[in-house]
Amino acid sequence: MAADTGATLLIRQGTQLYFHKGANLFVYGNIIVDGARENPVVFRNDRPEEFYDAISGQWGTVYIDPTSTSNIINYAFIINAITGLQVGLPSGDYSPGLEIRNSVIQNVSFAGIYAFGANFCGPS
């Protein structure tokens, strides 16, 4: 799944995204996750069996390209991934931007946030 260059992927509160093993979300444009405290957005594995709720590494990552700016993630749960968020790449002259608030990244097998040259901001 991908958000193409120049496009905005808006994910509204209460949305649940289910990823199959090895699946990723690639963001080349920008992403706005507009969850709410009582109705967060959930990124998780697609296995319905309760057993898989406790196993990390069930799907890939949400990848935000180095050229992507103005990304916002608010009230999201990102669970059971290999990497919760990958922001940018190890090489390059770009600084992707991400504002993340009120969110939980848990039960990942590699890294919650794997970032390169990124500009992050959170609560002040």
Image: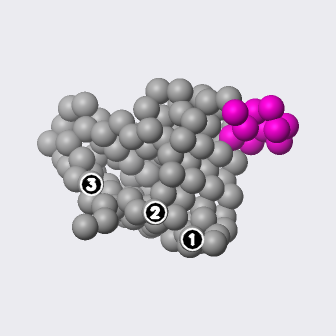
**Mark sitting earlier along the chain (2/3):** 2
Q: Decide: few, some or many residues near mark 3? Use Cα within 10 Å; few <14, some 14-19, many ≥20.
A: some
Residue identified by numbered label 2:
102
Q: Are marks 2 and 3 in contact (CB under 8 Å)?
A: no
Name the residue type under label 1: Arg
Which label sits in the foreground, 1 or 3? 1
Secondary structure beneath label 3: strand
| The residue positioned farthest toward the left in the image shown | 93
Seen at 24% across and 47% down, the residue is 118
Residue 2: image x %, image y %? Answer: 52, 50
Q: Is residue 33 visible?
A: no
Q: What amino acid is labelled 3 in the image?
A: Phe
CA distance for labels 1 and 3: 21 Å
Q: Mark 3 points at which residue?
A: 120
Task: Answer with the quarter of the image where residue 79 lies.
Answer: top right
Three-letter code for the amino acid on which mark 2 is drawn: Asn
Residue 100 seen: yes
Where disc 1 sits, the SS reads loop
For the point 74% across and 42% down, which residue is it? 46
Reading the image, the residue beneath label 1 is: 37
Location of residue 24 (image quadrant): top right
